[in-house]
């Protein structure tokens, strides 16, 4: 349901609020970069032929995601936070974790979701220029806590 709300939020604002973040060719070459957008730092990733944008500080304790590994988990691209190895889907910000399913015999390790934890943003490409539009999802997402100036204090404490 959270994911649906995020998608609806982005659809509601198809124009306006676009922030130029770089030339497409340069961003593809860089593969990842962080850009300040309004009150937050946004990580822009180019992987598997498309762009993704998400808050650059991890929802768990503010770790910098820029240099995390990217892994495919159940067909979904995930950023692995370098700090405590939390996995975050880059497309929708869902937090994933493994646990043992004891209902199976023998018990097996499975992937589960914590729900959407990291704010992801819309990326638009127009004539070779790339723009980010911040998610206006009104609800609280845990990554909000660690972004921007206010988040700096929390990142140091965490
Ligand atoms: Fe990212 Fe802890 S800060 S996993």
Image (cartoon, rainbow, N blue to C red):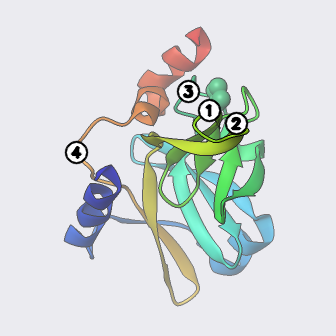
Q: CA distance from mark 1 to mark 2?
A: 5 Å
- Above or below: residue 152 compared with residue 96: above
Q: Residue at x 76, y 55 (%)?
A: 71
- Above or below: residue 30 compared with residue 66: below
Q: CA distance from mark 3 to mark 2?
A: 28 Å
Q: Which mark is residue 60?
A: 3
**Sequence-wise, which precedes: disc 3 or disc 2?**
3
The residue carrying mark 2 is 107
User: Pointer 1 and pointer 2: residues touching (CB < 8 Å)?
Assistant: yes
Ligand 1 is within 8 Å of the C-beta of the residue at disc 3: yes
- Above or below: residue 153 compared with residue 69: above
- Above or below: residue 24 compared with residue 136: below
The residue carrying mark 4 is 138
The percent coordinates of residue 81 (x first, y second) are 70, 37
The percent coordinates of residue 108 (x first, y second) are 71, 41
Which quadrant holds residue 132?
bottom left
Q: Nearer the viewer, residue 154 or 114?
A: 114
User: Pointer 3 and pointer 1: residues touching (CB < 8 Å)?
Assistant: no
The residue carrying mark 1 is 102
Question: Around disc 3, counting alpha carbons within 10 Å, would you say few (fewer than 14), some (14 to 19), or many (20 or more)?
Answer: some
**Sequence-wise, which precedes: disc 2 or disc 4?**
2
Which quadrant holds residue 62?
top right
Seen as rendered, the residue at the extreme bottom is: 127
Q: CA distance from mark 2 to mark 4?
A: 39 Å
**Sequence-wise, which precedes: disc 1 or disc 2?**
1
Q: CA distance from mark 4 to mark 1?
A: 37 Å
Q: Residue at x 63, y 41 (%)?
A: 104
The percent coordinates of residue 59 (x first, y second) are 52, 32
Quadrant in which ligand 1 is drawn: top right
């Amino acid at each position: 349901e959270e994911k649906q709300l995020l998608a609806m939020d982005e659809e509601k604002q198809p124009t306006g609020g676009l922030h130029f973040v770089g030339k497409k060719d340069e961003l593809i070459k860089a593969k990842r970069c962080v850009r300040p957008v309004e009150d937050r730092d946004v990580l822009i990733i180019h992987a598997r032929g498309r762009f993704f944008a998400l808050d650059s500080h991890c929802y768990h304790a503010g770790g910098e995601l820029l240099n995390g590994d990217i892994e495919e988990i159940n067909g979904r691209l995930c950023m692995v936070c370098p700090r405590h190895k939390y996995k975050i889907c880059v497309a929708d910000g869902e937090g994933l974790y493994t646990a043992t399913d004891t209902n199976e015999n023998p018990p097996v390790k499975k992937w589960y979701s914590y729900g959407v934890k990291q704010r992801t943003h819309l990326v638009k490409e127009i004539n070779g220029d790339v723009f980010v539009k911040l998610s206006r999802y009104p609800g609280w997402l845990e990554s909000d806590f660690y972004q921007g100036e206010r988040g700096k204090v929390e990142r140091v404490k965490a």
